[in-house]
Image (spheres, helix red, strand yellow):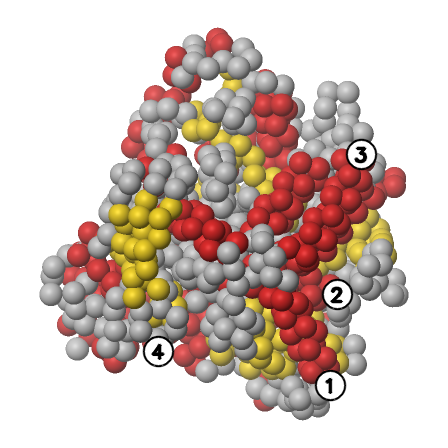
Amino acid sequence: MEKLVSKIPEGPLAEKWTRYKANVKLVSPANKKKLEIIVVGTGVAGSGAASALGELGYNVKVFCYNDTPRRAHAIASQGGVNAAKNYQNDGDSVYRLFLDMIKGGDYRSREGNVYRAAEVSNQVIDHFTALGVPFARDYGGTLTTRSFGGVQVSRTFYAKGQTGQQCLLGAYSSLNRQIKKGTVTMYPRREMLDLVVIEGRARGIIVRNLITGKLERYGAHAVVLATGGYGTIFYLSTLAVHSNGSAAWKAHRRGALFANPSFIQIHPTSIPQLNEFQSKLTLMSESLRNDGRIWVPKAKSDKRPPNEIPEEERDYYLERRYPAFGNLVPRDIASRAAKERCDAGYGVGQTGLAVYLDFRDAIKKQGEKAIESKYGNLFDMYSTITGTDPYKEPMRIYPAGHYTMGGLWVDYELMTTIPGLYAIGESNFSDHGANRLGAASLMQIAADGYFILPNTIGNYLSDQIRVPKISTDGPEFGEAEKTVMEKLEKLVSIKGKQTATSFHKRLGKIMWDHCGMIRNKTGLTKALVMIDELEKEFWSDLSVPGTVDELNNELEKANRVSDFFELARLLVSDALAREESCGAHFREEYQTPDGEALRNDEKFAYVAAWEYAGEGKPHILHKEELTFENVEMKVRSYK
Amino acid sequence: MKFTLKIWRQKNAEAKGAFVTYEIDDISPEMSFLEMLDALNKGLVEENKDPVAFDHDCREGICGSCGMYINGHPHGPVPAVTTCLLSMRHFRDGETITVEPWRAKPFPVIKDLMVDRSALDKIQTAGGFISVNTGSAPEANSILVKKHDADEAFNSGICIGCGACVAACKNASAMLFVSAKISQFALLPQGRIEAKERVRSMVEKMDDLGFGNCSNTGACEAECPKQIKLTNIARLKREFYKAL
């Protein structure tokens, strides 16, 4: 592998994207029609990209595993979309948004990429508004914003606690427009199970039709992965239960480097686990921290109902430890602080693994109606799930696995290390460094899909105009299909006693205990052994009823879990190799005397990009050094 | 808790289905309905038997994947809740629970409790969008929208496309679903420009696909997990007549 080239354009930060666009190679409208592009995934990034590429005149094929593109998990994003509009006149700017993201990411992201995301953010809001996304408005008819964690301006555009739903349905509508026009063909209920590489270039995919069970081949001049994150590696997470890492992992095995796999955000405010059969943890939006105050009792194991604990016996630990940001500290910090209190014996609820998020003061001050208008659906969701009323009693919350900052390594053009293979949205590692700021996800995925990829992909495709339609009869397609089929056959032939889900749960527990919010060398080393043992057991005692060539939900799950074993090992190895604490990656050995993350910029200011070296062989580490020309690397302080 | 489950099992679209009875024990009241089915399936898979197939994904009531008839109600007996968020505490210990797939001609059964709802996508493809190309949008605040209208558009826009309204309707009408999208765009200045063409295309497609008509029974509104209002259908009709 040659040295990693990030392809950040020359010139001042604020001019890089403009200069890039001015010099990029273009494809003529007549040639666009002849070029085929595959997009895998229909979240905001995938649907956005497919729409924008279709509008440009490319021939687009889109795939998703759900019954319809509208179900992608961007739908569950709650809080909002950041943009540097400065409608509030509170000192915001593209540069300020860039700074907040660089700092929030703990100086482990690329200046050029982050600045571009901030720059494009305003277009994202314009576009969604034009698509009819009903963002919250003021009485004069203008758009309104709210504050989010880790920043001191109000720049988050929102639609109650359902911003992701509204943005995704906006993207779905633009996708539908292209489907009607015939520029985009939609293939639902298909799961990508391998990438096809011909002469070093991404040329197609193998998918399984989830209804018939048959494998299908699709070819294209370029392949775009918009397949989301791998947070379900913890089993319990805020993700949809079918979210998985398999498509990205297959691309990785075919040669795409995987960057910073251990950077996983643990979201501080999710509803805690209530029973052992629980299949997911439901998020309570970070926006709630605008008005809710987080506390635990000052006394250990205080079993009194929360409303009977007087003010002076409550420990508002975030306000105490971080007076400047209080309840609005970034997610990584809020999560660790909750774990610290619970581990020390101050946690609440039956399990002691929860803290209070209390709206008493906000309701007293603003009235129940004002709180209802901001968070109504979240409060309803909470009371539906838990059976308690958050207007009357504080919510109980606990951190949960959420968003993966890590993902496939991409350059400035969002291309992976396989020519012609792109990764957009959460599936790449690009803009969030070691920790993502709230409401920066919808912003980045929409920017990638609608505005960045459609401008960069032409640079590659302009050289492909003489390449005829990709035939799916070649040996590479045959080999990929055979590899997939052999694995599926193996999974159904074990005929053991345990379900795929039971293995997934156990793997999740290993990862959560040893590679979750707090990590150390002993635990990580132990985790590697435990993963190997569990994987061995999986391949000898898994039960998958039925056959390969029929609808088989258990087979789908088993296949995803089998990939998670491999990804888990890489994740732990990455966490072991990074001997520092930064953002969401907290190594116990590297902390300040008062328990804050201790970065090591001299040795670790790089992107860890891992190369797959073959079955059973250790991954090879490539380092992309991060250089900061515009910002000074500081100790991140929210005190 | 302990339950007797009568579940519709159907191998595939062509096969004839039937109810199969299962006994299940050790269900805790905090579990969701789908987690209860997970527990049932765990037992089946461990015995290498075919588990009950059902669609589901986000498990937080927003993706719209899940949905089944539970004791005669789409998404079960509790109002304003999707199946994935329906808690077992709402059932009596020892109760017999009947579980069936959506029953509607435009939603053929795929397997067990899974149905094909692609007809809903086809209606959206017919006109459920505002024609704006990426990059051509005006500055967001140049489009002013009354707060009331924006809030109403949001209230219509929160439909999750689960199909419960169709399943609840004796005519298998998709009017509540269609009217939610029509309303969202009809209430916004961005959407007004194509309002006539949109309502004509979507209604025509809805009729073509075999969905029935609305006879004002209101079952859709009563069963909608997102509480989409019947007034949307009134708006759909107004919009449709204006477009004639």
Q: Mark 3 sits on what residue? A: A522
Q: Mark 4 sits on what residue? A: B14
State the separation of the CA atoms marked 4 and 3.
56 Å
Q: Quadrant of the N terminus of chain A?
A: bottom right
Q: Chain of mark 2?
A: A
Mark 3 vs 1, N-terminal side? 1
Q: Tell whether label 1 touches label 2 (CB within 8 Å).
A: no
Q: Nearer the viewer, residue A389 or A286?
A: A389
Please state which of the two labelled residues, at mark 4 or mark 2, is closer to the viewer: 4
Q: Mark 1 sits on what residue? A: A475
**SS class of the residue under badge 3?**
helix
**SS class of the residue under badge 4?**
loop
Please state which of the two labelled residues, at mark 1 or mark 4, is closer to the viewer: 4
Residue A187 in percent (x, y) is at 49, 75
Residue A253: mark in rendering: 2
State the separation of the CA atoms marked 3 and 1.
46 Å
- Residue occupying image coordinates x 70% and y 33%: A518
- On the same chain, marks 4 and 3? The answer is no
